[in-house]
Image (spheres, rainbow, N blue to C red):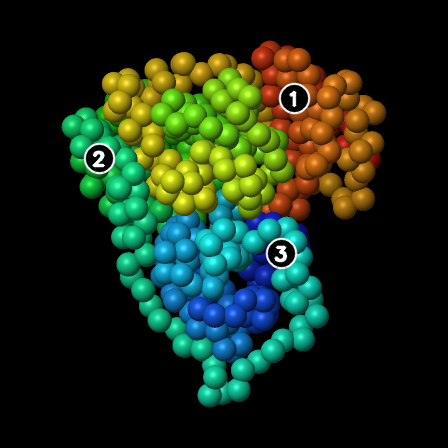
Amino acid sequence: MPGLIFGVSGVRGVVNSSLFPQDSLALGLSLGNFISGDIVVGRDTRKTGDLILNAFVGGLLSTGNSVINLGIVPTPTVLLNTYLLRKSGGAVITASHNPLEWNGVKFNDRDGIFLSEEEVRALYEIFEKKDFRIAPWEEVGIMECDGNGVKRHIDRILGLIDVEKIRERRYKVIFDGCRGALCSPAEELLSLLGCSVKILESNREPEPVPSNLGEVRDACASGDFDIGFASDMDGDRIAVITEDGKVPGEEYTFALALSHIFKRKKGKVVTNLSTSRMAESIAGDYLIRTKVGEANVVRKMMEVEAVFGGEGNGGVIWPDMHPTRDGLSAISILLQYMAEEGEPVSKLIKRLPWYHMKKEKVEIGDKVDLERLIEHLPRGEVRREDGIRIDYGDAFIHIRRSNTEDVIRIICEAEREKTCEVLLERARKALSLND
């Protein structure tokens, strides 16, 4: 069983196996020692959410920090509200796309941006030392419940899009949020956009990848819907399902959204090293790549004043709304793209270049030497800032340790499927030799 994972994406573990209530209490105490002031919190719909949230909030209150509890809301809603309400920081109880037995905590600063790698390391040191500052009883914090977080989020998006143009189309939309935190907000937003909405109450695995989306795919194949959307548990990643029941893959969400935004607003665009090269075909020399992880992408976006960003996992980052991956933003942008072009999403996808991409994850020991893998792969242009990425004329392969699971991730993309297969096989063999 994997242990507690502490990284740039926060903390994750299997509840009552590697993540216990006392860990959550210690995490709340740690954040309360790291940040002073009011903290905004929320959670996704996992069964263990109350267990982990209550212990975490207890830790925060014990340090004298007060808490604004938004309830069950998407992760980006917590980040946006931290910024809008001018609070000192925030935390979301979620394990995002991980299986249901997992849970965890994501941490953000006063600007509604996830903590940097350096800040996470500093927080981890506090957690490890367990030398917490505790407030006397008369100075402990209090918790206030705020039910308007989602409304603020939706209102901000409605102010950025052409609502009437989307309403004119009267789209029929099906949404599969795996019973997660985005289901209710998505239904509310889509209704305000004049769509007829069906919420699919599926029990699938949370990650919105094609292998998990059979039920919503089949629903779209019936011809009853203009588009389908699927999200993970905390609502920061979106996959698209076409009107004829095709699931092109989560890489297409960012590519489609970028196609629309970049046409309207030229400027620098940031994505990670694993994202499809469709991004280069759209943004060209404006594109900048950085390490995987929303925190890394957002901080690079702020550094270069990017107009847009995202990741190939279905994450869209629209800084005009807020610099965070946001499922509601992705849905809104894609509907406006369809409405303005007067085309179904299947035809918009056909405008993009076609690449073969394969993603695998390998469970392997901590001692694997990623640098040695280069010896077993064809020569190319090597980047080392996040594992090993090797670029070729018609392909790339990226091998790195996951931020959210105890695995090695392999992402390969090429113009020809055979090239992908050969690179993957050589990577698998190299990893087995290193194990």
Q: Residue at x 28, y 19 (%)?
A: 341
Disc 3 target residue:
120
Q: Position of residue 304 (x, y in %)?
A: 54, 37
Dots 1, 2 in contact, CB < 8 A: no
Q: Which residue is nearer to you in this view: 259 or 98? A: 259
Disc 1 target residue:
396
At label 1, counting other C-alpha atoms closer than 10 Å, the crowd grade (few under 14, some 14-19, many 20 or more) is many
**Res. 129 visible in picture:** yes
Q: Position of residue 6 (x, y in %)?
A: 64, 55
Q: Position of residue 359 (x, y in %)?
A: 59, 29
Q: Which residue is nearer to you in this view: 265 or 255? A: 265
Location of the C terminus (image quadrant): top right
Name which quarter of the figure residue 377 lies in. top right
Q: Is residue 190 found left or right of 399 in the rendered image?
A: left
Measure the alpha-carbon separation of dots 1 and 2.
39 Å
Q: Residue at x 46, y 53 (%)?
A: 112
Which label number is shown at residue 378? none
At label 3, counting other C-alpha atoms closer than 10 Å, the crowd grade (few under 14, some 14-19, many 20 or more) is many
Q: Is residue 299 found left or right of 321 in the rendered image?
A: right
First-in-chain label (3 vs 2): 3
Q: Secondary structure at mark 2?
A: helix
Identity, as a three-letter code, of the amino acid under mark 2: Val
First-in-chain label (1 vs 2): 2
Disc 2 target residue:
163
